Amino acid sequence: MQHQWFKDVCTLLASANTPEEVGEILNELLTPYERDSIAERWQIVQLLLEGRSQRDVRDILHVAIATVSRGARVLKYGRGTLQKKYESFYE
């Protein structure tokens, strides 16, 4: 059942017409801490894709190295979705 709920959330976000609408949905669904955590993970991924070392990312964002390592693992073993989205932002 939980898988279906996640799928429903993805469909909900995909139905938004603007980034602002996505933000409104996330503001209503997530706590401030959860929103900050998602934004932090995206910052980690961006800095790693820019070629920053894990230690640099740790120092820039003031997060634990384990947090940065998780982002690095996603980039190394993931499907490449985040990298493609990152590249599309900067084309």
Image (tube, grey):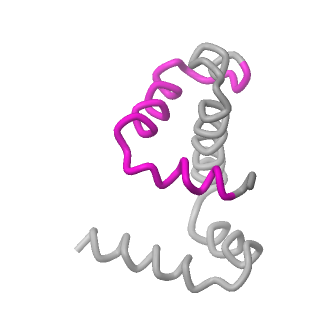
Give x and y (percent) for residue 70: 44, 31
Residue drawn at 45 percent across, 38 percent down: 75
- Above or below 48: residue 59: above
Q: Please state if 25 lies on the left or on the right of 6 as rendered.
A: right
Residue drawn at 54 percent across, 47 percent down: 83
Residue drawn at 73 percent across, 72 percent down: 19
Q: Please state if 57 lies on the left or on the right of 84 as rendered.
A: right
Give x and y (percent) for residue 77: 34, 38
Q: Please state if 4 lies on the left or on the right of 9 as rendered.
A: left
Quarter that holds the N terminus:
bottom left
Q: Where are the magenta residues, as a range?
A: 60-88
Report the front residue among 24 and 17.
17
Q: Please state if 4 lies on the left or on the right of 88 as rendered.
A: left
Report the front residue among 35 and 7.
7
- Residue positioned most to the front: 91
Q: For residue 84, which quarter of the picture?
A: bottom right
Q: For residue 55, which quarter of the picture?
A: top right
Give x and y (percent) for residue 58: 63, 19
Quarter that holds the C terminus:
bottom right
Q: How many marks?
A: 0
- Residue positioned most to the left: 1
Question: Magenta region, mostly helix, strand or loop?
Answer: helix
Residue drawn at 70 percent across, 69 percent down: 23
Inspect the magenta stretch and tell me whether residue 64 lies in it: yes
Inspect the magenta stretch and tell me whether residue 16 lies in it: no
Report the front residue among 80 and 65.
80
- Above or below 42: residue 20: below
